[in-house]
C-alpha cells in the first residue's frame, strides 16, 4: 500500500482578476521511505501542492491520504521545513526549538531534552544546543529546522526549498547532510526545489511540474546508486533529461 | 563601534558640560539679579533634598506617587494586553474597540482630572484612574500590532508541530509579540509618569511628588520644588533604564528580536 | 477556532475578504461598523445617567451635554476657548520645532555641540513636562507666557532627539559620494543631510506636537490663563457644571482627532511612502 496518496487534487485561488487555478488535477502515489522531489519553475504550484499536503491549504477538490487516513488540516504525522530562516522561534534556544513539538505532545522535560539533543546531534549541531537562532548561521538555522521537524517523529517530512537561500557551498554540504539524515531515519520526504542538480542528487523520483495551471508534466525515476557523484556521466544524463522536460515547459508558456 | 576609551571620553565631556552648566547657574543665583527664593543656590537645593530625605517626607511623597503610578499601570497591563490580543485575534472585537480607542486616545489624560474629581472625589482614585487612562492606549495598540505582526511562519510551524490554541497563545503569540508589548509598556510608563505628576498637582491630595512641587509654589519654596524635580527625574530614569532596560535585555535583546541600542 | 491564524498569508496571497464588496455598499458598512461602538457607549451612558447612579448634576444625560455644547458654541464661548488653546499650541510648537531642529542638527554635525547639549538634554528630558510647570509659573508669573514657554520647552525634546538621530543616521557613503561629486558644505547640507535626516525630523515633529497637546491642557489648568479649553474644564468644576466639562472634552477630542488625522497621519504617510525607510 502506498504511504501517501494524492488523488486528483486541484486548488483555485480567488483573486481580483478572477479565479486562478493554482494546482490542477494532480495525482501521485508515494511508497514508504521514498524521497520525492517536486521540480519546476516558480509559479508552477509545487509549493502550493506541498502546502496542501501539509494541511495549510485546503484543496478545492480531490483528496489526500497519508497512511490510509484522509488529510484534514495539519497534524503531527508530518514535519515541515520552510525556506525562510525566520521559521525558528527567536525566543527559544536551538534545543528549545527542537523540543517544541515534544512539549506540545506533553512529553516530560528531561525526556524531550534528551530526544532534542539527539536530533541536534543528527544534524551535527550538538555544540550549539544553547545558542539562540540569531547567533547561528543560515545553514545552521536550517539544520535546527530539520531537527525540529524530525524531533516529534513524524512519518513524513515536507521541505519547501529549505536550502534555496543558502550560498552554493553551504548548500552542497546541506544536501549531503540531508541525504545522510534520510538514510538514517528512512522518512518519506517530499522536497520542493527549482534546482535540477539538487533534485537529481537527492531524489528517488522527480515530478516535473508546469505553470499556468500547475500540473504534473513528467515523472522521472532517478535510479542512481547512493551516495551519488554529481560529476558522473549518469548524473549529468539525468540532469539533461530533466532540463529537456523543463525546456519544453518554457516553450509552451 | 564605540570602544570603551570612547565611552570614558564621552562621560568625561558630559561631566565637564554639567559642571560648567551648574557653575553658570550658581553664578546667576548668587549674582542677586533675581530674588534668592526664586533662584536658590545649589547648596540650598541639595540641603532641601537632604533634609526631606532624612526626615522621610520625600520618601513618603515618592511612595504615594509610586503606589498610584504602579497601581494604574498594572491595571492598564491587565486590561490592555488581553484586550489587544483579542483585538488582533477576533475581528468583531477589533471593529468594536478600535473606533473607541482612536476617538479617546487623542484626549490628554489630564483633561479628565476635573471630571474624575467630581465623580470620585479627591484622593488616590483620581490619580490611579488617570494613570490607567494614560497607560492603557499605548499598551493596547502596541499589543494589537504586535500580535498582528507575529510571523505567520511561526504559527504554521507551531501548528505543524501539534500546538493547540492554548500553547499557540502562550508559547508563540505572546513571545512573538513581546518586542511590541515591551515597547508599549515603555511608552505607557512614560505617559503614566507624566499623568501622575499632573494629576497630583491638579487633584491636590496632601501627598505625592506632584503635589509637593505644586504646594511648594504657594510658599515660594523653589529649593523644595527643584529637589522634588530631581527625585521625579531620578525615579523616571531608573524605571526607564533599570526596569524596562533589563526586561528588554533579558528577553527580546537576548533573542535577537531587537538590536541593542548603540551606546 | 483558528480564525486568527492567517492560513495563506505566508504564501503572499491576497486575503479573500479584501476583495469582497467594494464600492458604495461597503462604505456604508464601514460607517455603520465605526458608529456602532459609539452608539453602544452612548446607550450605556444614557442608562447610567437616567438611573441616577451618580447625582444627575455630576452625570448629565447626553441631551443635557448636547444642549450645553450647542449653547456654548452659539454664544461663542466654546470657540473662543478652543481658539486660544490652538494659538498656544501653535506658538509653543513652532518655537519648539525651530529651536529643536536647529539644536538637533548642530548636535548631529558638530562634536562640540553634541558634547554641550547631549548631557543637558538627557538630564532634562526624563522629567515629565508638567512637573516644570510650577517652576515656570514661579519664574515667569501666571498667564500666557509661561504656558507657551512650557509647551515649547517640553515638545522640543523629541524634536531634538530625533533630528540628532536622523543627522547621525545619514550614511557616510552619501556624504562621501556627494563630496566626490563636488558638493560644498552648504550644498551638502541642503541636498544630502537635510533630505537624509528628514524622515527622522518629521517623526520628531510628530512626537513633539503630540507631547505639546498633552501638556497644554494640563498647563492651562495650572497657569490660570483667562481662556483655554483646559481652564474651561477646570473652572467649570467649581460650579459642578459637568455638562460644560464634557462639552470641553468633546472639543478636545475633536481637535486631537483632527491633529491625528490631518497632521500625524499625513506626516507618517509622507515619510513612509516617499522614502520607504522608516517602519
Image (cartoon, coloured by chain):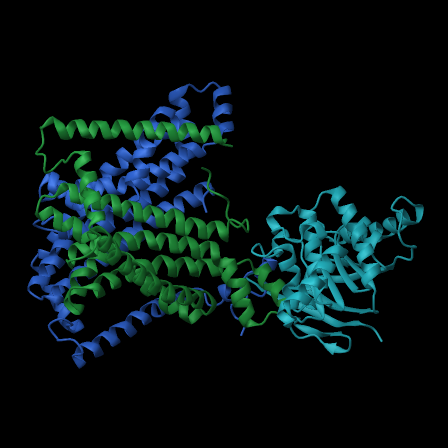
Chain colours: A cyan, B green, C blue
Residue C203's x, y, as percent? 36, 43
Q: Residue furthest front?
A: B54
Residue B124's x, y, as percent? 21, 64
Q: Is residue B84 visible?
A: yes
Residue C123's x, y, as percent? 30, 38
Q: Please, is residue A22 above or below residue B216 in the view?
A: below
Residue B137's x, y, as percent? 34, 59
Name the residue located 15 percent from the left edge and 58 percent from the top edge: B206
Query: Of residues A249 and C145, which is closer to you in this image?
Result: C145
Q: Is residue B42 left or right of residue A117?
A: left
Quarter holding residue C2 = bottom right
Q: How many marks?
A: 0
Q: Is residue B107 visible?
A: no
Quarter holding residue C202 = top left
Q: Residue furthest bottom?
A: C51
Q: Is residue C22 left or right of residue B132?
A: right
Q: Please, is residue A185 above or below residue B54 in the view?
A: below
Q: Please, is residue B23 above or below residue A167 in the view?
A: above
Query: Of residues A244 and C225, which is closer to you in this image?
Result: C225
Q: Is residue A203 left or right of residue C34?
A: right
Amino acid at each position: 500500500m502506498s504511504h501517501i496518496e494524492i488523488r486528483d487534487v486541484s486548488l483555485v485561488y480567488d483573486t481580483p482578476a478572477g479565479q486562478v487555478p493554482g494546482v490542477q488535477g494532480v495525482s501521485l502515489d508515494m511508497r514508504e521511505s521514498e524521497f520525492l522531489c517536486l521540480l519546476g519553475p516558480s509559479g508552477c504550484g509545487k509549493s502550493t501542492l506541498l502546502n496542501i499536503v501539509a494541511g495549510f491549504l485546503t484543496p478545492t477538490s480531490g483528496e489526500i491520504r497519508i497512511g490510509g487516513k484522509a488529510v484534514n488540516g495539519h497534524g503531527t504525522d508530518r514535519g515541515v521545513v520552510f525556506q525562510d530562516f525566520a521559521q525558528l522561534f527567536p525566543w527559544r534556544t536551538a534545543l528549545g526549538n527542537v523540543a517544541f513539538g515534544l512539549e506540545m505532545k506533553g512529553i516530560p522535560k528531561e525526556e524531550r531534552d534528551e530526544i532534542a539533543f539527539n536530533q541536534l546531534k543528527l544534524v551535527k549541531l550538538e555544540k550549539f544546543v544553547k545558542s539562540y537562532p540569531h547567533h547561528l548561521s543560515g545553514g545552521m538555522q536550517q539544520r535546527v529546522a530539520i531537527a525540529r521537524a524530525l524531533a516529534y517523529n513524524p512519518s513524513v517530512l515536507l521541505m519547501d526549498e529549505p536550502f534555496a537561500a543558502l550560498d552554493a557551498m553551504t548548500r552542497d554540504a546541506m544536501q549531503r547532510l540531508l541525504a545522510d539524515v534520510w538514510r538514517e531515519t528512512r522518512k518519506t520526504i517530499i522536497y520542493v526545489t527549482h534546482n535540477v542538480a539538487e533534485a537529481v542528487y537527492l531524489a528517488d523520483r522527480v515530478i516535473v511540474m508546469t505553470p499556468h495551471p500547475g500540473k504534473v508534466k513528467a515523472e522521472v525515476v532517478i535510479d542512481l546508486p547512493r551516495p551519488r557523484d554529481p560529476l558522473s556521466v549518469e548524473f549529468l544524463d539525468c540532469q539533461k533529461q530533466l532540463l529537456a522536460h523543463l525546456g519544453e515547459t518554457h516553450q509552451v508558456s | 563601534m564605540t570602544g570603551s576609551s570612547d565611552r570614558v571620553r564621552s562621560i568625561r565631556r558630559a561631566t565637564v558640560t554639567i559642571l560648567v552648566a551648574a557653575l553658570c547657574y550658581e553664578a546667576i543665583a548668587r549674582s542677586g539679579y533675581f530674588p534668592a527664593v526664586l533662584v536658590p543656590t545649589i547648596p540650598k537645593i541639595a540641603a532641601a533634598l537632604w533634609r526631606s530625605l532624612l526626615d522621610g517626607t520625600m520618601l513618603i511623597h515618592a511612595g504615594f506617587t509610586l503606589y498610584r503610578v504602579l497601581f494604574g499601570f498594572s491595571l492598564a497591563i491587565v486590561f490592555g494586553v488581553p484586550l489587544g490580543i483579542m483585538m488582533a485575534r477576533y475581528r468583531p472585537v477589533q471593529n468594536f474597540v478600535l473606533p473607541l480607542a482612536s476617538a479617546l486616545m487623542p484626549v490628554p489624560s489630564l483633561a479628565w482630572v476635573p471630571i474624575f474629581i467630581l465623580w470620585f472625589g479627591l484622593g488616590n482614585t483620581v490619580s490611579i484612574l488617570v494613570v490607567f487612562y494614560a497607560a492603557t492606549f499605548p499598551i493596547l495598540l502596541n499589543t494589537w500590532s504586535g500580535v498582528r505582526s507575529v510571523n505567520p511562519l511561526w504559527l504554521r510551524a507551531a501548528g505543524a508541530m501539534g500546538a493547540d490554541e492554548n500553547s499557540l497563545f502562550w508559547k508563540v503569540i505572546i513571545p512573538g509579540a513581546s518586542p511590541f508589548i515591551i515597547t508599549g509598556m515603555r511608552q505607557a510608563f512614560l505617559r503614566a509618569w507624566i499623568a501622575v505628576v499632573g494629576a497630583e498637582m491638579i487633584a491636590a491630595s496632601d501627598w505625592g511628588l506632584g503635589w509637593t512641587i505644586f504646594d511648594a509654589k504657594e510658599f515660594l519654596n523653589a529649593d523644595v520644588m527643584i529637589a522634588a524635580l530631581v527625585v521625579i527625574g531620578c525615579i523616571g530614569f531608573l524605571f526607564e533604564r533599570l526596569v524596562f532596560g533589563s526586561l528588554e535585555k533579558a528577553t527580546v535583546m537576548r533573542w535577537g528580536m531587537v538590536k541593542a541600542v548603540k551606546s | 477556532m483558528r480564525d486568527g491564524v492567517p492560513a495563506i498569508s505566508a504564501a503572499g496571497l491576497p486575503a479573500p475578504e479584501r476583495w469582497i464588496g467594494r464600492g458604495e455598499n461597503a462604505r456604508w458598512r464601514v460607517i455603520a461598523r465605526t458608529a456602532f461602538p459609539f452608539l453602544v457607549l452612548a446607550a450605556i451612558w444614557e442608562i447610567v445617567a437616567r438611573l441616577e447612579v451618580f447625582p444627575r448634576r455630576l452625570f448629565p444625560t447626553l441631551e443635557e451635554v448636547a444642549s450645553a455644547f450647542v449653547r456654548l458654541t452659539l454664544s461663542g464661548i466654546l470657540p473662543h476657548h478652543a481658539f486660544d488653546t490652538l494659538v498656544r499650541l501653535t506658538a509653543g510648537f513652532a518655537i519648539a520645532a525651530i529651536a529643536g531642529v536647529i539644536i538637533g542638527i548642530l548636535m548631529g554635525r558638530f562634536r562640540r555641540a553634541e558634547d554641550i547639549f547631549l548631557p543637558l538634554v538627557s538630564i532634562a528630558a526624563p522629567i515629565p513636562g508638567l512637573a516644570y510647570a510650577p517652576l515656570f509659573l514661579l519664574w515667569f508669573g501666571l498667564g500666557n507666557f509661561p504656558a507657551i514657554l512650557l509647551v515649547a520647552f517640553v515638545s522640543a525634546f523629541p524634536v531634538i532627539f530625533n533630528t540628532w538621530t536622523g543627522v547621525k543616521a545619514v550614511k557616510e557613503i552619501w556624504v562621501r559620494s556627494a563630496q566626490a561629486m563636488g558638493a560644498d558644505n552648504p550644498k551638502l547640507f541642503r541636498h544630502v543631510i537635510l533630505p537624509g535626516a528628514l524622515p527622522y525630523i518629521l517623526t520628531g515633529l510628530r512626537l513633539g506636537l503630540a507631547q505639546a497637546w498633552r501638556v497644554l491642557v494640563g498647563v492651562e489648568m495650572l497657569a490660570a490663563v483667562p481662556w483655554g479649553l483646559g481652564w474651561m474644564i477646570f473652572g467649570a468644576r467649581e460650579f459642578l457644571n459637568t455638562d460644560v466639562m464634557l462639552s470641553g472634552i468633546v472639543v478636545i477630542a475633536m481637535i486631537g482627532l483632527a491633529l491625528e488625522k490631518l497632521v500625524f497621519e499625513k506626516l507618517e504617510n509622507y515619510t513612509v511612502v516617499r522614502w520607504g525607510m522608516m517602519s
